[in-house]
Image (spheres, grey):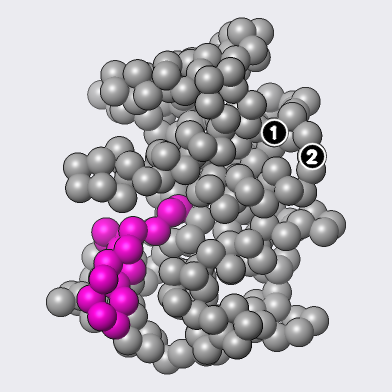
């Protein structure tokens, strides 16, 4: 029997928890709720969670710290799976959104919000997380190599020229895949936002710039004079490398 996706709501407001659990269940999801970080970890031990809706402000630990810890655990052997995170922020401040993306959130939504928009964001994140681009299908190469680096598309591991392997967050992986799928082609912020988040970029939205900066750090690419991910002033970003496909990363 097919099981429904499980959404974990982490929010200290009992009314929001009740509203979202009821709304998501009426729309075909399994929904569980937690009021703080302690209950979140307990719920993750008891349930197979497909996505977390995580409030920024919590009584025992802020959502940013919990998101960072969640990503850190996913990088450990036998650790927590890399679960998508939709961050809820009480303010529309750009700094909150940027820091949320830096900590590994897949998307964000500002309170107060329409439950229908939350539902649309959840569905979009799950589609993106599970989508298989054409070059990820079984008959094609599993590894994409460039400038000494190698991306294992099955394990989502990025291996450096010196052999050090680094797990990527969902957002980092999607951004790198997009750049690798369009090498030596300039992509502007609107195109990248649409391909990564499934929506248009908002005015003055710097989320893509933050993700580019994080990806440059992963690739040890000097942000002042990048060699791999170059900035084309007034246009966007380009991955300046040739791509080699392999069936194995070893």
Give the alpha-carbon distance from disc 2 to disc 1, as whole Å: 7 Å
User: Image point 50% across, 85% down: which residue?
Assistant: 228
Q: Are marks 2 and 1 in contact (CB under 8 Å)?
A: yes
Specify whether 201 is left or right of 31.
right
Q: Quadrant of residue 193?
A: bottom right
Query: Element type at marker 1?
Result: strand
Q: Judge whether 19 appears above or below 136 on screen.
A: above
Which of the two residues, 36 or 190, is positioned nearer the viewer here?
Answer: 36
The reply to whether residue 84 is visible in this rendering is no
Magenta span: 154-170
The reply to whether residue 210 is visible in this rendering is yes
User: Image point 59% across, 22% down: which residue?
Assistant: 58
Label disc, if present, on residue 89 of the rendered structure: 1
User: Image point 67% across, 57% down: which residue?
Assistant: 207
Give the class, few, some or many, for how many residues have Cα within 10 Å of label 2's Cα (few <14, many ≥20).
some
Q: Which residue is mark 2?
A: 92
Asked if the magenta segment contains residue 164, the reply would be: yes
């Amino acid at each position: 029997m097919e099981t429904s996706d499980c959404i974990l709501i982490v929010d200290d407001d009992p009314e929001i928890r009740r509203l979202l659990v009821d709304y998501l269940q009426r729309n075909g999801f399994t929904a569980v709720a937690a009021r703080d970080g302690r209950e979140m970890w307990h719920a993750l031990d008891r349930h197979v969670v497909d996505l977390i809706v995580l409030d920024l402000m919590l009584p025992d630990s802020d959502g940013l710290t919990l998101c960072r810890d969640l990503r850190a655990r996913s990088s450990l052997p036998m650790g927590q799976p890399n679960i998508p995170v939709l961050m809820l922020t009480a303010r529309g401040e750009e700094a909150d959104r940027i820091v949320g993306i830096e900590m590994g959130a897949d998307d964000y939504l500002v309170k107060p919000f329409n439950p229908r928009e939350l539902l649309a964001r959840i569905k979009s994140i799950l589609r993106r997380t599970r989508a298989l681009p054409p070059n990820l299908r079984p008959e094609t190469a599993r590894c994409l190599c460039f400038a000494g680096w190698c991306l294992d598309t099955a394990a989502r591991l990025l291996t450096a020229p010196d052999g050090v392997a680094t797990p990527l967050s969902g957002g980092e992986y999607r951004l790198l895949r997009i750049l690798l799928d369009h090498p030596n082609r300039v992509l502007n912020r609107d195109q990248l936002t649409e391909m990564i988040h499934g929506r248009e970029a908002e005015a003055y939205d710097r989320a893509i710039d933050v993700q580019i900066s994080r990806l440059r750090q992963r690739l040890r690419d000097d942000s002042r004079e990048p060699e791999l991910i170059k900035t084309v002033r007034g246009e966007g970003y380009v991955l300046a490398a040739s791509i080699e496909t392999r069936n194995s990363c070893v």
